Amino acid sequence: MKTYHMYHTESISAESKLKDAEKQEEKQFSKSGDLNVNLLRHEDRPQRRSSVRKMEKMKEKRQAKYSENKLKCTKARNDYLLNLAATNAVVAKYYIHDVSDMIDCCDLGYHASLARTFRTYLSAEYNLETSRHEGLDIMENAVDNLDSRSDKHKIMDMHNQVFCPPMCFEYLPHMGDEVSAQQPVQTELLMRYHQLQSRLATLKIENEEVRKTLDATMQMLQDMLTVEDFDVSDAFQHSRSTESIKSVASETYMSKLNVAKRRANQQETEVFYFTVSTCFLLDRYHNQ
């Protein structure tokens, strides 16, 4: 914007100087018309012609300067408009798409892990105290209704001042300047348009491949996080001795080795998913 304003100021200044030169030229010709050339002395005629040539040369120089500054102003204004549109698009995409994607990336598996934790608690409570069935049924219903997407929308609605896109940047013309299409600039913009279309086609293919990898990893991670291992009823079966209870629990519940292995695989998958998601989001901004 500052560059555009600077070039526009220079264009206005050059136009003013050109108009001054044109007025001086008109005055010069007006004076020349008032004086009959035949009445001039012979030694004054070369001086008069020299003055006219200087005036014409100065006008041509100022005309060239004005045309040059006008073209610079037009290019700067178009660059300003293009960057303005790109900036508004990036900001809108961030608040409309990327914030939601980042939330999905960071909280993936949270609701599944929360559900498994509470289901384990429910299984233990049902076996310890049957008189609490009504309260536990209410809690089970709440766990069944856990919805990550709904919770995300609720938290974004509750804090809409943070998650809503801000107002778009507006084009601010400088001193009454108007947007106009110049032939040299039109050709340049058309070339840039075709280049961007080609680049976008390539990026679309690349993003689709990354997205497939991301979706496959997300599905794998969700499968790991939705294992139905919350039923611990076998650990609460009636037995005559404490030793038999411990024996049944150790035989029916998953071993520590399997738990450690599963957690290691899950952590490795989570790190890979988070890395791919980060690269996917960053590439969006690098390619703007």
Image: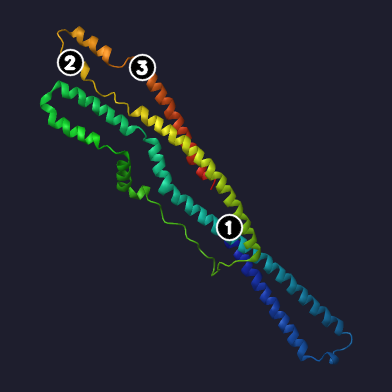
**Which residue extends farthest right?**
42
Secondary structure found at label 3 = helix
Q: Residue at x 47, y 39 (%)?
A: 211
Q: Quadrant of residue 102?
A: top left
Q: Which residue in the structure is indicated by mark 2?
A: 237
Q: Nearer the viewer, residue 74 or 247?
A: 247
Q: Quadrant of residue 222?
A: top left
Q: Quadrant of residue 113?
A: top left
| Mark sitting earlier along the chain (3/1) | 1
Q: Nearer the viewer, mark 2 or mark 1?
A: 2
Q: Residue at x 24, y 27 (%)?
A: 119
Residues marked 2 and 1 touching at CB (< 8 Å): no
Q: Residues within 10 Å of mark 1 (few under 14, many from 20)?
A: some
Q: Residues within 10 Å of mark 3 (few under 14, many from 20)?
A: few
- Left/right placement of residue 218 relative to residue 59 reads left
Residues marked 3 and 1 touching at CB (< 8 Å): no
Callout 3, which amino acid?
Asn
Gap between marks 2 and 1 measured at Cα: 75 Å
Q: Residue at x 24, y 34 (%)?
A: 143
Q: How is the image coloured?
A: rainbow
Give above or below for 269 relative to 75: above
Give residue 79's mark. Answer: 1
| Mark sitting earlier along the chain (2/1) | 1
Give above or below for 123 relative to 87: above
Q: Quadrant of the N terminus?
A: bottom right
**Residue 212 at x, y = what percent?**
47, 37
Callout 2, which amino acid?
Gln
